[in-house]
Amino acid sequence: MARRNFTPGRLAAYIVLIVWCILAIFPIFWMASTSFKPVTEGFGGLGSLLPQNPTLNNYVAVSRLLPLARNILNSVTVATVGTILTVFLCSLAGMAFAKYEFPGKNALFFLLLATMMVPPEAGVVPVFAIMRALGWINNLLSLIIPTAATAIGIFYMRQYISGFPNEVMEQARLDGCGEFRIYWQIVVPVVAPALAAWASIAFIARWNDFFWPLIFMRSKEMFTLMVAISTLPVSEGLSTPWPVIMAGTTISVLPLFVIYFLLQGYQKEGLALGAVRG
Amino acid sequence: MPSSGLLQRIWRARTIYLFISPFFILFAIFQFFPLVWSFYMSFHEWNGLGPMEPIGLQNYRFLLRDEVFHTALGNTVIYWLANGLLILPLALLLANFLAMPHLAGRRLMRSVMFLPYVTATVAVGLIFNMIFDFNSGLVNSLLNAVGLPSVPWLTSVEISKLPVIFLNVWRLTPWYTLILLSGLQGMNPELHEAATVDGAGPVQRFFSITIPVLMPILFFCFITLTIDSFRIFTEPYILTQGGPGNSSLSIVQYLYLNGFRIFKLGLASAIGYALTFILLIVSAAQIVLLLRQSGLTEVN
């Protein structure tokens, strides 16, 4: 096939894609750049694209304003434990719906889908009361447990595991494997890419979550990174300088960027898309 | 006896029920029970400490004539429409371009494009807050540089919703681009080849082949975008605090204010129900779609 290189259509496509890429990366670049500018340096115009006298002072300032190590630890704990738990429970339930027949299966699956339609925010007041009764206010469990098994995660895993060959499972059963061993030793290794893809989506959601930690975490020490960062603009009197705030936001997004690029290989196009394609 | 047969089948599948039980237990405790409770609460006045006072339909009647609620509802609908009208066409366009054969730098562009979705909403909110600042923001200094006057992006009642919309478009477009891209790549290339042989140009092929084939996915995207739009909270909370004068306040933000700032828990519950009701109408369509896609109807 001849490579039709530069038709006007292709040129337009390249221009649109490149412009969008620039728009996508520019605010992030601007944030990182500003975070290294001394607070006295002008940061408004394009003229100050890069800091003239780069400094780490803003990072020092942020770590004085916030119990940063503690906030990071909270976010890491919630995101890591929450992700592991949800990937485990969702894939287990996903396998059950994909590969087994049991009374009430269709009704239960229908119920599962129906739960996706209810906005969780609607019941936030009673949920808060429940957390208070459990003693989970200001406790990371309130952020980890409610989303430990999610409908969308189970739905996604079910779609993916449906393609797993029945014969392999049947053979294992004849060899005397229990159902959990079949899951753990036979299904999990094969669907590992789907688990990794779902894990990265789940991790992003937990790391970036704001609404629930804002409500459940009531002290500076228990804030997740996102809640802590959101308090920066008004943390000391009224106006924290923008470079200091940007140092905070840079710290808050950096871990995800690193993980994102490390997990590139797993991401493929897929992710939640298996769920869409069915 | 059929019932003992049923019991037997249930007993035999006990491990499987155990596998699916965590979700249903968590759902019961953290979603279903709260929903029932907040229904009850919505007919009461309660500040969270004293006794609940039954007041019948008053919370709902109040919402019907509450101007702040109407503003929040109107704003949320505008966010929803803007998201739908901007994000989906844009994502469709970008996905189409990304799916072009022999595209140089496809992997890199896809990675770069996806970065906004990885960036936390709180962080983006603060970045946009800085960029759209009236005095020192980058956007206004760019406008000034080409001889245009500064625009009060975040402090004007008329346009405070714009930065919120920009933020949504910037952060959510990549997600939908990726979903549509996977749909495009799953398409049968012969469809396009046949149409090309028949003399259809790229634009004609786009409208008569690509769009119809992608329709189920587009529909799915529209429904998820709708649900996310109605649940919008963090963006206005960080960017404009809902202001100036409630001009960018969203429904969930209003719910949060009533529930956790001024402790009108009954009213907050009623707002939650209004939100649920609106979404339920939209979601009825989603149930139908998901059922069709999951093949559940074939099992029956």
Image (cartoon, grey):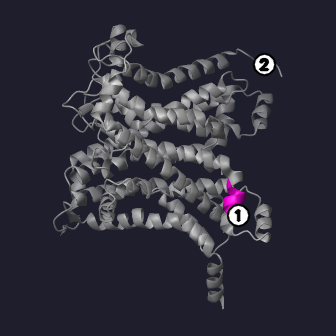
Task: Tell me, yes or no, whether the highlighted magenta stretch contains residue A189.
Answer: no
- Marker disc for residue A133: none
Classify 10 Å Cα crowding around label 2: few (below 14), some (14-19), many (20 and above). Answer: few
Q: Position of residue B22 (x, y in %)?
A: 51, 65
Nearest to N terminus: mark 1 or mark 2: 2
Q: Position of residue A94 (x, y in %)?
A: 61, 60
Q: Position of residue B75 (x, y in %)?
A: 32, 40
In this rendering, the answer to whether A66 lies above or below A157 is above
Q: Amino acid at mark 2?
A: Arg
Task: Tell me, yes or no, whether the highlighted magenta stretch contains residue A183.
Answer: yes
Q: Which residue is mark 1?
A: A182
Taking the view exactly as shown, the residue that stands out farthest to the bottom is B1
Taking the view exactly as shown, the residue that stands out farthest to the left is B50
One can see residue A257 in this view = yes
**Closer to the camera, B7 or A59?**
A59
Q: Position of residue B130 (x, y in %)?
A: 33, 24
- Marker disc for residue A3: 2
Q: Quadrant of residue B199?
A: top right
**Closer to the camera, B217 or A166?**
A166
Instruction: Measure the C-alpha gap from mark 1 to mark 2.
Output: 49 Å
Could you tell me if the residues under marks 1 and 2 are in contact, i.e. CB atoms within 8 Å?
A: no
Q: Quadrant of residue B250?
A: top left
- Per the rendered image, the range of residues in magenta is A182-188
